[in-house]
């Protein structure tokens, strides 16, 4: 049976600011777009996980942008380690400081990368559309 890609969207409101996450997971990779106020592409980083028997962090590079490089690389490395897959992360911030937003984005990442994510447009067991 062919495995389908998982797409999950979520949002949080913190300090009267809207934060969004769009997560896409395929068999060998995952992509997450993290943004403030609206879905937008921001600084883009990619990370490749280390083989399971190799110590150390995944290797990462920024491939687009220069504003939020610390967060983009950090979250790409985190996601690559957590999922054991190639990870691409976009971080877009309008006004909030990058360091302030990290804790909020970390919570969003945890919510959208749960083991059995809610797939967009598919009914959950409670019967509501997600």
Image (cartoon, rainbow, N blue to C red):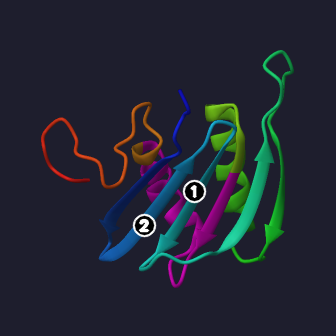
In the image, which disc is placed on residue 61?
none
- Relative horizontal placement of residue 58, taking residue 83 as reference (left or right): right
Q: Which quarter of the figure has residue 2?
A: top right
Q: Nearer the viewer, residue 51 or 71?
A: 51
Q: Nearer the viewer, residue 6 or 58?
A: 6
Q: How packed is label 2: few (under 14 Cα within 10 Å), some, or many (20 or more)?
A: many
Q: Residue furthest bottom?
A: 95
Which of the marked residues, 2 or 1, is nearer the chain's N terminus? 2
Report the residue at 64% width, 51% height from top.
75
Q: Position of residue 51 (x, y in %)?
A: 83, 24
- Relative horizontal placement of residue 13, taking residue 2 as reference (left or right): left
- Relative horizontal placement of residue 60, taking residue 20 as reference (left or right): right
Q: Which residue is mark 2?
A: 20
Q: Which residues are magenta?
A: 88-110
Q: Position of residue 80 (x, y in %)?
A: 69, 39
Q: Residue furthest front?
A: 1
Q: Which residue is mark 1?
A: 32
Marks 1 and 2: in contact by CB < 8 Å? Answer: no
Marks 2 and 1, how far apart in space?
10 Å
> From the viewer's perspective, is residue 111 above or below residue 103?
above
Report the residue at 78% width, 19% height from top.
52
């Amino acid at each position: 049976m062919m495995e389908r890609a998982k797409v999950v969207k979520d949002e949080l409101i913190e300090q009267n600011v809207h934060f969004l996450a769009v997560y896409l997971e395929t068999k060998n990779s995952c992509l997450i777009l993290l943004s403030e106020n609206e879905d937008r592409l921001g600084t883009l980083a990619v990370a490749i996980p280390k083989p399971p028997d190799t110590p150390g962090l995944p290797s990462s590079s920024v491939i687009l942008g220069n504003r939020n490089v610390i967060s983009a690389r950090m979250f790409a490395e985190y996601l690559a380690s957590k999922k054991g897959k190639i990870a691409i992360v976009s971080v877009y911030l309008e006004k909030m400081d990058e360091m302030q937003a990290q804790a909020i984005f970390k919570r969003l990442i945890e919510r959208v990368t749960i083991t059995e994510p809610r797939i967009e447009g598919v009914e959950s067991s409670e019967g509501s559309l997600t």
